[in-house]
Image (spheres, rainbow, N blue to C red):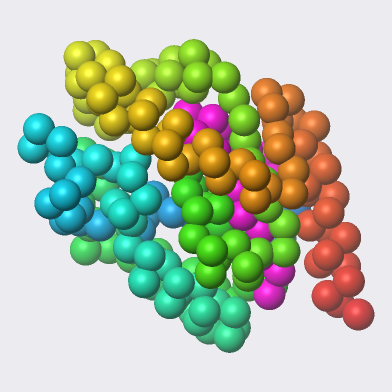
Amino acid sequence: MYIIGIAGGSGSGKTTFTQKVLAQVNDPRVGVMHQDNYYLSQPPRELLVDGEPNFDHPDAFDWPLLRNHLGLLKESKRVEMPIYDYESEMRTKEVQVLGPCKILILEGIFALWDRDLREQMDLKFYLHVESDIRFIRRLFRDLKDRARTLEEVIRQYYDLVRPMHQTYLEPTRQYADMIVGEETDTAANVLSAMIKQKLNELKT
């Protein structure tokens, strides 16, 4: 299985970028793992900041489950990917069946954080978008889709998102094979062409 990692800060456009690629490739042999679905329902106590969970720290994710699912997919098996609900800040009882697939895209803020996962990736992308643009995107998204107030979004950004990005996320940029700026359409075209070529090779 050919594995592609797509990382980047909150609001950098990872999901949109991935959707563009999927739409252009349009092949059921390509699967997607959304790292957000692997958030822990109960983050470790040490991640609580004034009683609020820190979702922008690497330890907020269920790495053992993510590694296990990736291993099963590499064995051409199916997995039941959890579904995370942002409003309740917990996993739902529903799951999404994923696999088997020939090409897998793993997208998420810390897609390039874990060494074991990185070493299994064939291609690694990092979406680099300026902080002001990422904040505006996050603001609109959280107000519209995640039932947050303006005050909550601003406080969370300055108390958690920004410092976590600088401390933990930005350094993972060094592991990327390709760094994508704001011209994501061009990058999506390039990645789509690479995936199509790889799929053609797998037919032979």
Residue at far left of view: 51
Q: Which residue occupies 68% across, 47% down?
A: 176
Q: Is residue 197 above or below residue 173?
A: below
The residue depicted at 15 percent of the width and 36 percent of the height is: 49
Which quarter of the picture shows residue 184?
top right
Q: Is residue 23 left or right of residue 61?
A: right
Percent coordinates x, y for residue 120 in the rendering: 63, 70
Nearer-the-camera pick, 125 or 200: 125
> Considering depth in this image, is 33 or 115 the residue closer to the camera?
115
Residue 19: in magenta span: yes
User: Where does the magenta region start and end?
Assistant: 1-23
Residue 23: in sight, yes or no? no
Was residue 30 drawn as part of the magenta stretch in this picture? no
Asked if 82 appears above or below 169 in the picture, the reply is below
Residue 119: which quarter of the image? bottom right
Give the image location of residue 74, x and y in percent. Answer: 59, 79
Q: In the displayed structure, does residue 27 sit left or right of residue 157? A: right
Horizontal side of residue 134 vs 64, given as left or right? right
The one nearer the camera, 40 or 15, is: 40
Vertical side of 80 occupied by 150: above or below: above
